[in-house]
Image: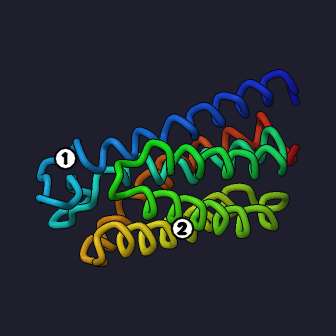
């Protein structure tokens, strides 16, 4: 195990995690194949299924937080959640501040609660299970608070699941960099 590589991967994941937050907040109102008046910009995530475009980065954020915790330790994982929540509130567009901050905090702590006990024995299972819990919490809370509707819940969940699926091979590589939690 190379501790220098572990540190670099952890710090890169922390930076990418924090960068994903303003990107998701910007995308939800500016990037999409369809932009709903007074609502989100939507992207296709499966045939016949649309989701607010921020899902493309939110799913990745859930996995990145797990990488931070794995490489830098429990305290750094919690610090990432705290910093991310603050950043989410600071960069969210006015109407989305409450929805973004609340959904972010609740989903990341839900991810943390599932990931932490599972990671020592089954890293890939921990990442997948915790991300699924986190993305469902994020989707329900964000859509309810931001738009007062769960109309896009299926698309939200499927869109975030794509990021998790893409991360599975990367998680397997992470076991080589950080075979045991920091």
* Residue positioned 86% across, 25% down in the render: 2
Distance (Cα) linking label 2 and label 1: 24 Å
Residue 130 location (% of width, % of height):
63, 65
Q: Is residue 75 left or right of residue 97?
A: right
**In the rendered image, the vertical position of residue 100 relative to residue 140, given as above or below:** above
* Residue positioned 59% across, 52% down in the render: 85
Residue 66 location (% of width, % of height):
68, 50
Label 1 secondary element:
loop
User: What residue occupies the far top of the structure in this picture?
Assistant: 4
Quadrant location of residue 149?
Answer: bottom left
Label 2 secondary element:
helix
Q: Is residue 181 left or right of residue 78?
A: right
Residue 181 location (% of width, % of height):
85, 48
Tell me, yes or no, whether the two marked residues, 2 and 1, touch with CB atoms within 8 Å. no
Chosen colour scheme: rainbow
Q: Is residue 111 left or right of residue 40?
A: right
Quadrant location of the C terminus in the rendered image: top right
Q: Earlier in the sequence, mark 2 or mark 1?
A: 1
**In the rendered image, the vertical position of residue 151 relative to residue 156, given as above or below:** below
Disc 2 designates what residue? 132
Report crowding for label 2: few under 14, some 14 to 19, many 20 or more residues within 10 A (C-alpha).
many
* Residue positioned 28% across, 57% down in the render: 52
Residue 32 location (% of width, % of height):
19, 47
**In the rendered image, the vertical position of residue 80 relative to residue 45, given as above or below:** above
The residue nearer to you, when weighing 13 against 119, is 13
* Residue positioned 50% across, 44% down in the render: 90
Disc 1 designates what residue? 32
Quadrant location of residue 31?
Answer: top left
Residue 23's mark? Answer: none
């Amino acid at each position: 195990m190379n501790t220098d590589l572990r540190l670099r991967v952890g710090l890169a994941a922390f930076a990418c995690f924090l960068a994903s937050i303003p990107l998701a907040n910007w995308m939800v109102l500016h990037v999409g194949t369809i932009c709903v008046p007074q609502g989100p910009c939507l992207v296709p995530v499966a045939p016949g299924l649309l989701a607010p475009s921020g899902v493309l980065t939110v799913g990745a954020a859930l996995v990145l937080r797990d990488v931070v915790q794995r490489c830098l330790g429990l305290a750094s994982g919690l610090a990432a959640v705290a910093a991310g929540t603050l950043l989410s509130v600071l960069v969210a567009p006015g109407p989305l501040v409450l929805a973004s901050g609340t959904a972010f905090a609740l989903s990341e702590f839900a991810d943390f609660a599932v990931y932490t006990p599972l990671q020592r024995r089954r890293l890939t299972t921990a990442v997948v299970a915790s991300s699924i819990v986190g993305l469902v919490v994020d989707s329900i809370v964000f859509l309810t608070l931001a738009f007062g509707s769960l109309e896009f819940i299926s698309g939200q969940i499927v869109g975030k699941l794509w990021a998790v699926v893409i991360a599975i091979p990367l998680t397997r590589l992470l076991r080589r960099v950080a075979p045991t939690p920091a």
